[in-house]
Image (cartoon, rainbow, N blue to C red):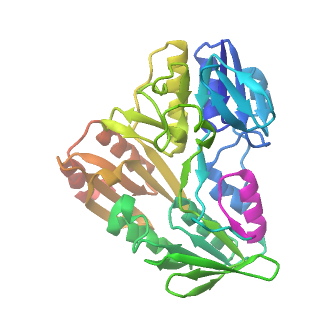
Amino acid sequence: MTVVIVGASVAGIRTAQALRMQGFDGDITIIGEEAHLPYDKPPLSKDWLTGETPGPLVTEEQLAALAVDLRLGVRATSLDPRGRVVQTSAGHSVAYTTLVIATGLTPRMLPGVVPPAGVHTIRTADDAVALREALLKRATAVVIGAGFIGAEFASAARRHGCGVSVVEPQPTPMAHLLGDRVGAALAELHARNGVHLHTGVTFDRFETTPDGRVRAVVLGDGRVLAADVVVVGIGASPATRWLESSGVPLSDGVECDDQLRVHGYPDIFAAGDVARWPHALYGHSLRIEHWSNANEHAAVVAAAVVGNPVPAPQVPYVWSDQYGHRIQIIGRPSLGELVSMTGTAEEHLVGVYADGAGAVVGAVVVDDPRRMLQFRKAIMRRAPATELVAAEARPSAR
């Protein structure tokens, strides 16, 4: 039996490790588009930009122990499910018995815009290295998009002493996920750390130097922001273009069952950011772009492949490091309404979200991992939000 994993991502590497841990002794081939040894993605917008380059996701010794055929610098270009073959950019046909799709995401660029030199997204190690070199020169930076990627880059740029402006079309950053009050509290971190936040305004165009480098960002209201470097952080899309002619069901990701097996293709699985599957805690299909989710998917896929019991899904969890603070989001706050908020983003902020039935569905916690674990348990058992709000009101809750 041969398992082919497309994507040397967290989901891809962890799947190979989980397969070996669960007793799979067949052949494993991993196809990775980048030439680098596999590495974690979250540090790209954090540690990599400040010079603290993390080690690889898996070492050469660990790879040898896994006994995998790792093909780096090779991109999957198409899939033939009937023939059970993946075509690659190297011109090879890679046959499989079981396929795992773990290709992750592709950053979105501004629609209809050809980016000039100096305009970046953050998705690869090469992206992060190029940006770090610009920051070391004390570049003036503009960030388009005030989500986690944009905010983390802004934080790193300020650590380098760079001037930073953040452009966000929403009146309040993160409001679509966390609501206005929590979004405003997190936005205050930017202001307190010297970042100029421009909200409720759209990008219009770039101005360039005679040699074609970006020199300014022009906003929809006519304002002009000087820029030596620009980061576009407006989200990402599932990396599924190579699958479009395969017949595999695609709908903002690869459509899977509760064991991450692709609908209609029992020998194909998807894992990580690219997978859309019915989450047992929510009763509907969803796709989660979280590092923790990729790790959990690996265990699910490995268990399904070898025939072991599949672990239960976990509560979604994501974190972001900004200006020396750790912002943690547990559950899915966007499914409910904010029912309680205490503290500030610099002083142990806690926000609790409840659904229409009054059950807690999500929380935001800053700099308090113990509280985050309490909320995880509460969401799992659908605890009444009033129970948590009462606990937050007690002096002993801190």
At a point 70% along the width and 42% down the height, the residue shown is 39
Q: What x and y, as percent, mark residue 327?
A: 47, 57
Camera-nearest residue between 130 and 213: 213
**Figure label count:** 0
Camera-nearest residue between 334 and 261: 261
Q: Is 389 placed above or below 186 here?
A: above
Residue 193 in view here: no
- Residue stretch in magenta: 117-135
Place residue 179 in its image quadrant: bottom left
Q: What x and y, as percent, mark residue 117?
A: 75, 70
Camera-nearest residue between 374 and 295: 295
Q: Is residue 174 found left or right of 247 in the rendered image?
A: left
User: Is residue 89 rendered magenta in the image?
Assistant: no
Q: Is 297 placed above or below 109 here?
A: above
Camera-nearest residue between 109 and 314: 109
User: Is residue 118 rendered magenta in the image?
Assistant: yes
At a point 18% along the width and 48% down the height, the residue shown is 358
Q: What x and y, as percent, mark residue 101?
A: 59, 32
Q: What x and y, as percent, mark residue 295?
A: 55, 35
Q: Is 98 placed above or below 279 here?
A: above
Residue 261 in view here: yes
At a point 63% along the width and 16% down the height, the residue shown is 97
Q: Is residue 165 found left or right of 348 in the rendered image?
A: right
Q: Is 27 placed above or below 32 here?
A: above
At a point 23% along the width and 49% down the height, the residue shown is 355
Could you tell me which quadrant the N terminus lies in?
Answer: top right
Could you tell me which quadrant the C terminus lies in?
Answer: bottom left
